[in-house]
Image: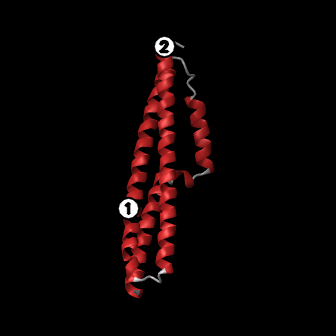
């Protein structure tokens, strides 16, 4: 490989690492949000849905909305780095550094899609974002219950 090809490979590797980092950060954020959700839920129930717990329920709604926005942003960053890595892969194939395995990859992809005909259509980022929106909705439910029982 030439210096230029080495640079392309290093840049490709960096893009893939940045993609992984975005995915890992999204998972860590979600874990924190779930821990906070469990703590707030425990507090509200322990206090028997007392009106004093209303602010933490509102906080839970805000945390859920923030989590949804952050998860969507992490997805955007991951998509950016993936598109950069794909462009660099194309450049490496065109330069002859990496074999053109498009036909093999497409056959493998088609086999996978037939095996998971429905599930492959469900976008993972909607599940991540939906989880956070669900937490926000749970916060709203806590607010409603607190207002009715408090």
Residue 25 or residue 39, whichever sits in front: 39
Task: Identify which residue is drawn at 52% across, 57% down.
Answer: 31
Residue 73, percent across and down? 39, 48
In this view of the protein, which residue sits in the foreground, 19 or 25? Answer: 25
Write the residue at 48% across / 30% down. Answer: 14
Q: Quadrant of the N terminus?
A: top right
Q: Position of residue 91 (x, y in %)?
A: 46, 23
Q: Is residue 143 above or below residue 18?
A: below
Whether residue 119 is situated above or below residue 84 in the rendered picture: below
At horizontal 60% and vertical 36% (from top left) the residue drawn is 107
Q: Is residue 60 visible?
A: yes
The one of 123 and 44 positioned closer to us in this rendering:
44
* Residue 7 percent across, percent down from the top left: 47, 20
Q: Earlier in the sequence, mark 2 or mark 1?
A: 2
Question: Colour scheme of this structure image?
Answer: secondary structure
Count neighbours of disc 2 (C-alpha within 10 A) and say few if under 14, some if 14 to 19, many if 20 or more: few
* Quadrant of the image containing the C terminus: bottom left
- Residue under the image location 51 percent in, 74 percent down: 42
User: Residue 104, relative to residue 41: is it above or below?
Assistant: above
For residue 110, which quarter of the picture?
top right
Relative vertical location of residue 121 with respect to residue 85 in this rendering, above or below: below
Labelled disc at residue 33: none
Mark 2 vs mark 1, CA separation in Å: 46 Å
Residue linked to disc 1: 65
Residue 124, visible in the rendered structure: no
Q: Residue furthest bottom?
A: 149
| Residue at the spot of label 2 | 3
Corner quadrant of residue 52 = bottom left
- Residue 125 place in picture, x, y as percent: 47, 52
- Would residue 77 appear left or right of 23 to someone viewing this image? left
Number of numbered labels in the structure image: 2
Residue reaching furthest to the top: 2
């Amino acid at each position: 490989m030439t210096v230029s090809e080495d640079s392309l490979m290093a840049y490709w590797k960096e893009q893939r690492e940045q993609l992984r980092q975005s995915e890992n950060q999204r998972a860590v954020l979600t874990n924190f949000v779930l821990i906070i959700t469990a703590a707030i839920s425990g507090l509200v129930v322990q206090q028997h849905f007392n009106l004093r717990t209303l602010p933490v329920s509102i906080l839970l709604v805000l945390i859920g909305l923030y989590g949804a926005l952050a998860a969507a942003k992490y997805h955007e960053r991951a998509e950016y780095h993936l598109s950069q890595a794909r462009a660099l892969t194309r450049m490496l194939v065109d330069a002859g550094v990496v074999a053109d395995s498009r036909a093999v990859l497409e056959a493998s992809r088609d086999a996978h899609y037939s095996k998971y005909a429905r599930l492959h259509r469900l976008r993972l980022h909607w599940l991540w974002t939906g989880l956070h929106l669900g937490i926000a909705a749970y916060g709203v439910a806590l607010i409603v219950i607190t207002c009715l029982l408090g």
